[in-house]
Amino acid sequence: MQQNIKETIKNKYGKIASQTTFANKVIQFNKQLSFTEKLPNGIRVMNPFQDNAEIISITEIFYNKFYNDDRKRKLILGINPGRFGAGATGIPFTDTKRLQKICDIKIESVNTHEPSSVFVYELIEKYGGAKKFYNDFYINSICPLGFIEKNEKENWVNRNYYDYDELFFAMQNFITTSLKKQISFGIDTNICFVLGKKNAKFLQLINKKEKLFHSIVTFYHPRYIEQYKSKMKDKYISEYLNKLTA
């Protein structure tokens, strides 16, 4: 299996990432992602890198395609993976539709549509395309693992790391450690872009203590825009582009 992955990467994208590339650092980080400590009752962790055997190979292809270099990048942080985006594909703000259509990477085991991914990839297109965008930015989430909980109808639904105080406190050390590891990939710490106003408040709390970033710029979250402000999407994309390229 591992040899097949390497051959796929080599055949499609040239060379396999060395141990020092941005791609390899992300891949190793994802492979080691794990949280086994106690969570509030009813909350479960989503870890696509452990839950779906195909995801490691898919993400290796993605990161070797777009991050096979040692360039510094600016960081964009979401909240935590959702069930139909990174919780399924392992790639932040990337559902299976965008993964295949825009990134030319097909995933066999799941099929998802995520509104946040729609917005992000429209933004990426306006920026100049996936290659240019990922040359300049690395996207992940403040908490790189997601959470689900059963609602009153007994359906599993997404939860955010800040939805419950006890959940945030349980994840705080993990979040801080994960951010520091990702900064070591080659992140420009002069500025960090964060998606969601409430999300930004928690990052500000962490940053005040840890001094990770010199400044933090906050955007409305793509899901909020798609769900409540879709008629003004072009305006929000322009705001994103103006701040990302300032």
Image: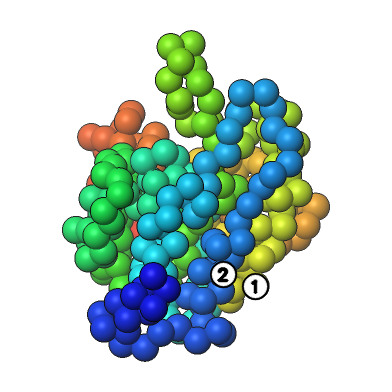
Q: Which is more N-terminal, label 1 or label 2?
A: 2
> In terms of secondary structure, where does tag 1 sit?
loop
Q: Residue 5: which quarter of the image?
A: bottom left
Count of labels shown? 2
Q: Which of 133 and 109 is in front in this view?
A: 109
- The amino acid type, in three-letter code, at marker 1 is Ser
Q: Position of residue 144 (x, y in %)?
A: 56, 51
* Quarter of the picture holding the C terminus: bottom left
Q: Is residue 96 above or below residue 162?
A: below
Which of discs 2 and 1 lies nearer the camera? The answer is 2
Q: Position of residue 170 (x, y in %)?
A: 74, 38
Q: Disc 2 marks which residue? A: 28
- The amino acid type, in three-letter code, at marker 2 is Gln
Label 1 near label 2: C-beta < 8 Å?
A: no
Q: Disc 1 marks which residue? A: 184
Q: Which residue is located at x 58 percent, y 39 percent?
A: 45
**Cα distance between the residues tagged 2 and 1:** 12 Å
Q: Which residue is located at x 39 percent, y 70 percent?
A: 1
Residue 104 visible (yes or no) = yes
Q: Residue 162: which quarter of the image?
A: top right
Q: In this view, does 1 lie above or below 70?
A: above
> In terms of secondary structure, where does tag 2 sit?
helix
Give the residue furthest to the right: 209
